[in-house]
Amino acid sequence: MIRKPQQRSIATRARVLQAAMDLSQRHGLELVTAEAVATEAGVAKGTVFSHFGDMDGLLSHVLMDRLQSLRNTANNDENTRKDLSDPVGLLLNRMMGLIAVITDSPTILRLFLDNIGVTKPNCAAEFVETLSALDADLAAFLDMWQNATDMKPPLRQDRTSAEMVDGLIAFMIHGAMVFKSHQITDRSELEGRLRRHVEAFLLK
């Protein structure tokens, strides 16, 4: 049975994206070129651009896949769900995970800032959805912490979870910037600084 053109187009787009993801895992994002992706996917170079516009468009989807994988890992972590003895530590794990993703390369950090509207005027719709899901996960954890009587230390009660998430996002972006600009070069030092910020901001 011959597939419809739309089905073939969807399959080709998925193959191109998978090729980019595979190449970025094997060689690093900076070495992912349109030529390499086309060869890996078995398509013409023009096909890569016809589906994603340019390399930024393609690599933005690679970044979104990494963000979604980060979310899936955090939500499926049994230890995270069971061990609530250090809620600040659990938040820091999520924050450092995101920082690790977006500081993987200069291109990734630039694309992240572009797509959240920091360096470009519009935020890509797909990023809004992906980042909103990550924000919702953080908010759900903060809601649970706020309402739990047995989680120590207690969380502040004078701010909504959405307001607190905004603060955590600001800390993460700032942390990513100081790390990538080499103001801090040690991840454990960055995590220690973030812990102090988070404790000062969130705790009663």
Image (cartoon, helix red, strand yellow):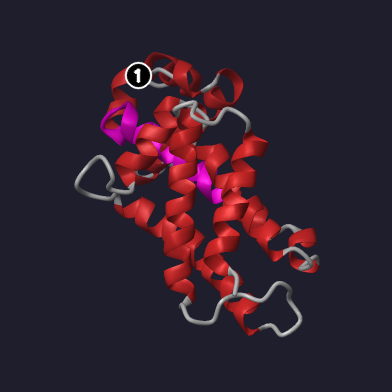
What amino acid is at disc 1?
Answer: Ala
Position of 43 relative to 77 (above/below): above
Looking at the picture, tell me which residue is in the foreground, 19 or 61: 61
Residue 186 position in % (x across, y down): 63, 30
Q: Label 1: few (<14), some or many (≥20) within 10 Å?
A: few
From the top left corner, tell me how far across and down residue 120 is, in percent. Answer: 22, 42
77 vs 19: above or below? below
Segment colored magenta: 51-69
Residue 101 percent coordinates (x, y): 54, 39
| Left or right of residue 193, residue 153 in this image | right
Q: Residue at x 63, y 35 (%)?
A: 187
Q: Is residue 7 magenta?
A: no
Q: Along the horizontal axis of the image, is 7 left or right of 105?
A: left
The residue lying toward the viewer, choosing from 181 and 17, is 181
Residue 137 visible, this orientation: no
Tell me which residue sits at (54%, 55%) in the image. 197
Assess whether residue 67 is covered by the magenta stretch. yes
When the figure is inspected, residue 73 is found, relative to residue 52, above or below; the finding is below
> In the depicted view, which residue is nearer to us: 161 or 2?
161
Count of all numbered marks drawn on residues in the image? 1
- Residue corresponding to mark 1: 44
Q: Residue at x 33, y 48 (%)?
A: 116
Secondary structure character of the magenta stretch overall: helix
Image quarter of the C terminus? bottom right
The residue located at (37%, 19%) in the rendering is: 34
Q: Quadrant of residue 137?
A: bottom right
Foreground pick, 169 / 34:
169
| x, y percent for residue 169 | 45, 55
Q: Is residue 81 visible?
A: yes
**Residue farthest left in this picture:** 121
